[in-house]
Image (cartoon, helix red, strand yellow):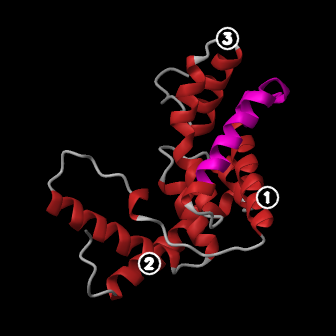
Amino acid sequence: MIGADPVPETLASRAATLFRGYRGGDEARMADLIELLTPILWHTVRSQRLDRESAEDVLQTTWFALVRSSDSIADPQAVLQWLIVTARRESWRVVKRADRLEPREFEDDDVVAPLRDLPEEMVLRDDGASRLWQHITALPARCQALLRVIAFADRPDYAAVAKSLGMPVGSIGPTRGRCLAKLRQSLAADNSWEGA
């Protein structure tokens, strides 16, 4: 149709394009795919309460699994979902192997600060990020998982997110709204929060 707005490209479709390129012989596309999806996978893995080192191992295992299984993924459009499910299953395997599940707060270095900032700016921002994560970890587990995944995806693919979190697609928006309202209410009640 003339004049119709193009359909916005989703995270899943961008991932599929890169994955197709990689399978077509352009190995540089794998590096692009890793750069695109590592943030969402990182927060998916960390939401399983793995420490930083274990989370890094799970991510590495997940990416190796994709390289080994790349020919067996029939539909490149499913690569995002495949990676999220694989990362989550590997996280569960690591947790089960350790035979314990320790809730952990996000470490200060989970929020990357540009090196060009002044030390006092970095301290203020890190303090604000730490307070924000304290409030996020006080939310129900479903809210934590959803906000972590949604917050770090440029254009989240709701179908893939819904399937990986076990939620109906139509409930993601309303659930996100309720979770954000709870977070805003919690932050508003915190006298030390200044929106840093």
Question: Does dot 1 land on a helix, a strand or a loop?
Answer: helix
Task: Please tell me which of labels 2 and 1 falls first in the chain.
Answer: 1
The residue located at (65%, 28%) in the rendering is 16
Residue 190 vs residue 173, the one in the foreground: 190
Instruction: Sort mark 1 into few (<14), some (14-19) or many (20+) by Cα contacts within 10 Å.
Output: few
User: Which numbered mark, 2 or 1, is in the foreground of this view?
Assistant: 1
Estimate the x, y position of residue 103 in percent, counting from the top left.
Answer: 60, 75
- Distance from disc 2 to disc 3, alpha carbons, whole Å, reads 45 Å
Q: Is residue 184 above or below residue 57?
A: below
Estimate the x, y position of residue 24 in percent, counting from the top left.
Answer: 69, 12
Instruction: Sort mark 2 into few (<14), some (14-19) or many (20+) by Cα contacts within 10 Å.
Output: some
- Distance from disc 2 to disc 1, alpha carbons, whole Å, reads 28 Å
Which residue position holds label 2?
135
Question: Does dot 2 land on a helix, a strand or a loop?
Answer: helix
Per the rendered image, the range of residues in magenta is 55-78
Task: Please tell me which of labels 1 and 3 falls first in the chain.
Answer: 3
Q: Quadrant of the N terminus?
A: top right
Residue 19 among those drawn in magenta: no
Q: Quadrant of the C terminus?
A: bottom left
Which residue position holds label 1?
93
- Residue type at mark 2 is His
Which residue position holds label 3?
25
- Residue type at mark 1 is Arg
Q: State if disc 3 and disc 2 touch (CB < 8 Å).
A: no
Estimate the x, y position of residue 82 in percent, counting from the top left.
Answer: 75, 41
- Distance from disc 1 to disc 3, alpha carbons, whole Å, reads 32 Å
The residue located at (22%, 59%) in the rendering is 122
Whether residue 8 can be seen here: no
Q: Is residue 67 left or right of residue 3?
A: right
User: Which numbered mark, 1 or 3, is in the foreground of this view?
Assistant: 1
- State the predominant SS element of the stretch in magenta: helix
